[in-house]
Amino acid sequence: MNRSERKATTKGAEDQGETYILRLFTADDEPNSKQAKENLKRLEETYLKGPHKKEIVDVLKDFQTALDNNVLVTPCLILDSPLPKVTVFGNLSNIEKVLASLRLK
């Protein structure tokens, strides 16, 4: 599958009724982790109108899940579905880049 075909199949996933599955890895209430949680909540309220599931994993309490997902840096947001899987690092403050990465724009 070439790049344009891949783009066509992933564009508008929310419009097609696909459930977004997001997993945010944080480190307790560290400043960047706290900001990432707030930004993700805002993103959900504003841009994720369709079906979606969110899980927040505190790596200080559940390091095994972080290791299973190859997460070594926090905060880290993983889009598990729809495919392809996407990983976004940082506090999610650059909303334009986050939306583009998650194929919501």
Image (cartoon, rainbow, N blue to C red):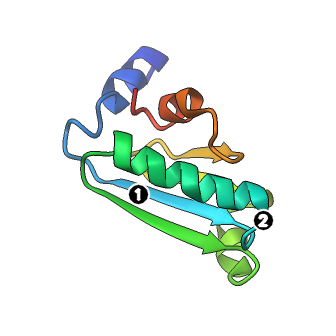
Residue 16 image position (x, y, % from top left): 19, 38
Q: Which residue is drawn at 26% across and 45% down?
A: 49
| Amino acid type, label 1 | Ile
Rendered location of residue 92, percent (x, y): 62, 43
Q: Which amino acid does label 2 sit on?
A: Glu
The residue positioned 79% from the left and 57% from the top of the image is: 73
In this view, the residue in front, 7 or 39, is 39
Number of residues whose C-alpha sits closer than 10 Å to that of mark 1, classed few (under 14), some (14–19) or many (20 or more): some
**Residue that protrudes farthest toward the bottom in the picture:** 61
The CA span between labels 2 and 1 is 24 Å
Residue 101 image offset from top left, x and y in percent:
53, 33
Question: 46 or 67: which is nearer to us?
Answer: 46
Evaluate whether residue 96 shows in this view. yes
Tally of numbered discs: 2
State which quarter of the image contains the N terminus: top left
Q: In this view, does 44 lie to the left or right of 33?
A: left
- Check disc 2 and report the residue beneath it: 30
**Residue at the image position 58 percent from the left and 59 percent from the top:** 37
Residue 83 position in % (x across, y down): 42, 44
Q: Is residue 43 above or below residue 57?
A: above
Query: What residue is disc 1 on?
Result: 21
Eyeballing the image, is 8 above or below 57? above
From the image, state whether disc 2 or disc 1 is nearer to you. 2
